[in-house]
Image: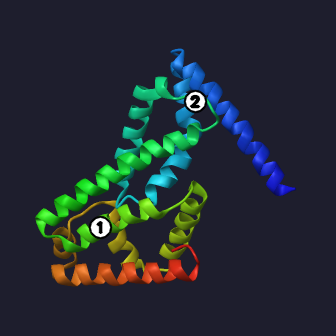
Amino acid sequence: MADADDEQRANVSAVDDDRLSVRIQQGDRHAFLELVQSSERELRIFITLYASNLAMVDEVLQATYVTVFERIERYQPRGTLRAWLKGIARNLLYKELEARSRMHALEGDILEELLAASARRQLDDDGPGEQAEARLRGLQQCLLQLSPDATELIRSRYYEDRPIADIAARLARSQTWVAVTLYRIRKTLLTCLRQRGVA
């Protein structure tokens, strides 16, 4: 019964999305705002799963909506607007991760290069949004199990996008210590995600 209710809600949402898309195509700017408000949380979750920091999430999310606004005339209302939005976000994410991987390779930041390459591979391998949401929920739960010091390191590096050298200077530690500690924390998180069956 619950599955039938979920399917009906999804169908209603798809119809509502297509009505919005038609209004946007007719020049209704308020409809575009409605689309952003109704889809932002879902898109943000999807992007967060692969982005290496919050700045990247915001950049890709904003670029996605700019692209949607520019290309909405091409969308054919067939109940697939959310998938179309995620497809745009996926392409932008892939390009951003590829650019970061090249940049980190040039800078000699092997760990960051590998993270970006790994995120690109995961983006290729992952299925629909439900799997992405499950992985994100699992990651959030695993992050709660970290020590306060480990949480602060993760926040500084991946959410605030601070360079390893800055973190090391602030903590009065070597850059090697910061890099190795971050590597160990990521391994701990990966183990936790595997135990939850979402990695």
The residue closer to the viewer here, 169 or 52, is 52
**Residue highlighted by disc 1:** 157
Is residue 61 shown left or right of residue 193?
left
Numbered label attached to residue 136:
none
The residue closer to the viewer here, 177 or 191, is 191
In the structure shown, which secondary structural element does the residue marked by tag 2 occupy?
helix
Q: Position of residue 46 (x, y in %)?
A: 50, 54
For the N terminus, the image quarter is: bottom right
Three-letter code for the amino acid on which mark 1 is drawn: Arg
Residue at figure coordinates x 60%, y 29% from the top left: 77
Q: Position of residue 102 (x, y in %)?
A: 19, 59
Numbered label attached to residue 34:
2
In the structure shown, which secondary structural element does the residue marked by tag 1 occupy?
helix
- Name the colouring of the figure: rainbow
Three-letter code for the amino acid on which mark 2 is drawn: Glu
Residue at figure coordinates x 45%, y 79% from the top left: 190
Is residue 58 shown left or right of residue 4?
left
Above or below residue 25? Residue 39 is below
Q: Is residue 173 visible?
A: no
Q: Position of residue 158 (x, y in %)?
A: 33, 65
Is residue 11 shown left or right of residue 20?
right
Q: Position of residue 151 (x, y in %)?
A: 40, 74
Badge nearest the viewer, 1 or 2: 2
Residue at figure coordinates x 56%, y 32% from the top left: 35
Above or below residue 131? Residue 34 is above
The residue closer to the viewer here, 192 or 74, is 74
- Label 1 or label 2, whichever comes before in sequence order: 2
Q: CA distance from mark 1 to mark 2?
A: 34 Å
Above or below residue 10? Residue 190 is below
